[in-house]
Amino acid sequence: MIFLGLAGAFVYVVWDVSKGLPDTKQLASYEPPVMTRIHASDGSLLAEYASERRLFVPIVAVPRKLIEAYISAEDKTFYQHAGLDWRGIAAAGIRYVNVKLTGKGDIVGASTITQQVAKNFLLSNERTLERKLREAIIVQRIETAFNKDQILELYLNEIYLGLNSYGVAAASLNYFGKSLNDLTLEEVAYLAALPKAQTTTIRSSTRPARSSAATGCSSRCTTTATSPSRR
C-alpha cells in the first residue's frame, strides 16, 4: 500500500509540473526564429531585420569539424545517452560537494546538449526542484520527437554565443566575418569554447583573446566520436 501511495504521488507530481509544457507533436513542429535578410538584385545584402541575429543552417551543411568540436566541448556522450548523462550528473555532484567542503575549484554543471535545447522551451531560469523536473520531462519529449542529428541542429542554431549571436552561423559572421565553411580549426575551437566562457568574455564588443578552453578544444575536437549513420 505504501508503495502504491508513493507511486501515485509521483505520477501526480509529474502530471502537475508538466502542465503547460509542449507535447511531442508541438515540439516536432517547432521552427526556430530566423532573421529576415533583404538582398539587392546583384545578391549584395541591403538590410537585416530581427531583434536577435539568427541564421539557420541545416545540420547537413554544418562542417564536421565544428560538430565534433561542440560535442567534444559540451557533451562527449551525446550520441550514446537518452538525454540525461547520469555519469556526468554524478561527477558534477561529487565535484559540488568537494568544492563546498574544501572551498577550492569551480562548480561545474552537467547539462547535456539535449538539456540545453530543453531550456529554450522553459520560461523560468530559477534553480528549483520543480524547474528541474520540468526540464527532465522536456528532455525526454525532445528525445522522442527528434533524432539526435535534429537535436544537434536545434542546438547549433539556437545557442547564444555572445555579440547578440544566436547559433554558430551568426557567431561565425560576428566574430570572424566568415561563413562556417571558411573557419580555421582554431576559429572552430574558439566558437566551441564560448558556451563555457565567462559571461564578461562572451559579451565583449570585440573578439577576446583565445581562451584556454579553446586551446583544449582544439586539441580534442579531431578525436571526438562522430555521429552514427543518420536515421
Image (cartoon, helix red, strand yellow):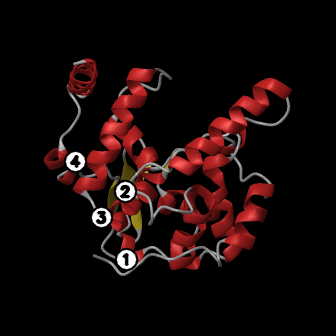
Name the one closer to the observer, 181 or 71: 71
Residue at the (47%, 55%) spot, across then down: 167
Secondary structure under tag 4 reads helix
Asked if one can make out residue 34 in the rendered structure from this viewpoint, the answer is yes
Q: Looking at the picture, does residue 173 appear above or below residue 122?
A: below
Q: Amino acid at mark 2?
A: Leu
Secondary structure under tag 2 reads helix
Which numbered circle lies on residue 27? 4
Q: Position of residue 57 (x, y in %)?
A: 38, 66
Badge 2 vs badge 1, beta-carbon distance below 8 Å: no
Q: Quadrant of the C terminus?
A: bottom left
Residue bearing the label numbered 1: 60
Q: Looking at the picture, does residue 5 appear above or below residue 135?
A: above
Q: Earlier in the sequence, mark 3 or mark 1?
A: 1
Name the one closer to the observer, 31 or 3: 3
Q: Name the outermost residue toward the left.
A: 25
Q: Earlier in the sequence, mark 2 or mark 1?
A: 1
Q: Earlier in the sequence, mark 2 or mark 3?
A: 3
Q: Position of residue 152 (x, y in %)?
A: 41, 61
Q: Amino acid at mark 1?
A: Val
Q: Nearer the viewer, mark 4 or mark 3?
A: 3
